[in-house]
Amino acid sequence: MDIQKIIEALDQNGTTHKPLDRIALFPCDHEALHVYWEITNDRLLNISRSLELDAGSLHRALRVYDITWGSLSGAEATSYWELVVPEDATNWFIADIEQGRTYIVDYGVMTPENRFMTLLRSNSVFIPYEEARHWQEQHPMNLGLFHEEYPDASFFASCIRLA
């Protein structure tokens, strides 16, 4: 069965996934995060219109905030850095983070002048000093807005570390 037939069958059953603007951040292990997001075309078009820029000139990016000594708003972040991600990406693995710190991630666009514009803000995640696997077994994470589609499920970070 091809993908178009599957989509049509889901449409007829009323179970088609409706795109939403949402983001979720998970600890992967004691040195990494994994962030998942969904963003609607309408939201991307709105930001390109408000900036009076062609959508193609806006690069997708993540801004990772260490908010260990700051606030959830990111305004008083201990530090932050940005990663440009492919336009079609819906998740990203963020490696080499520090243990014992709390992080949030913004998904946004980078203008041609390298100005970052936030479109989505994640939940906060604390990275423990111990191995995350043991910690995750004791602390399953709720998907936040993703949880609406899977209300009875608990999710654990799913990362495969290569090297």
Image (cartoon, helix red, strand yellow):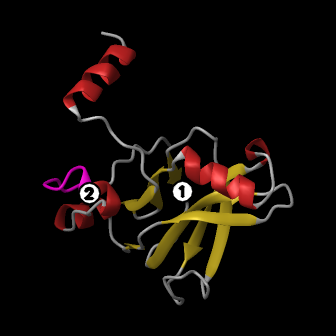
Residue under label 1: 95
Residue interval drawn in magenta: 148-155
- Magenta: main secondary structure equals loop
Measured as percent of width and height from the top left, residue 148 is found at: 25, 56
In the image, 84 versus 147, the foreground residue is 147
Q: Which residue is drawn at the image coordinates 24% and 25% (left, top)?
A: 12
> In the picture shown, does residue 14 fall above or below 107?
above
Measured as percent of width and height from the top left, residue 47 is found at: 67, 57
Residue at the extreme left of the image, as rendered: 152
Residue mark closest to the camera, 2 vs 1: 2
Q: Residues within 10 Å of mark 2 (few under 14, many from 20)?
A: some
Asked if the residue at tag 1 contacts the one at tag 2, i.e. Cβ–Cβ closer than 8 Å, the answer is no
Q: Dot 2: what SS?
A: helix
Counting every numbered tag in the picture gives 2
> In the picture shown, does residue 146 fall above or below 129?
above
In three-dimensional space, the C-alpha distance between marks 2 and 1, rounded to whole angstroms, equals 25 Å
Q: Which residue is drawn at the image coordinates 49% and 73% (left, top)?
A: 103
Considering the image in quadrants, where does the N terminus appear?
Answer: top left
Residue under label 2: 147
Measured as percent of width and height from the top left, residue 111 is found at: 79, 57
Q: Which residue is drawn at the image coordinates 40% and 43% (left, top)?
A: 160
| Relative to 140, 103 lies left or right | right
Identify residue type, mark 1: Ala
Identify residue type, mark 2: His
Asked if residue 149 can be seen in this view, the reply is yes
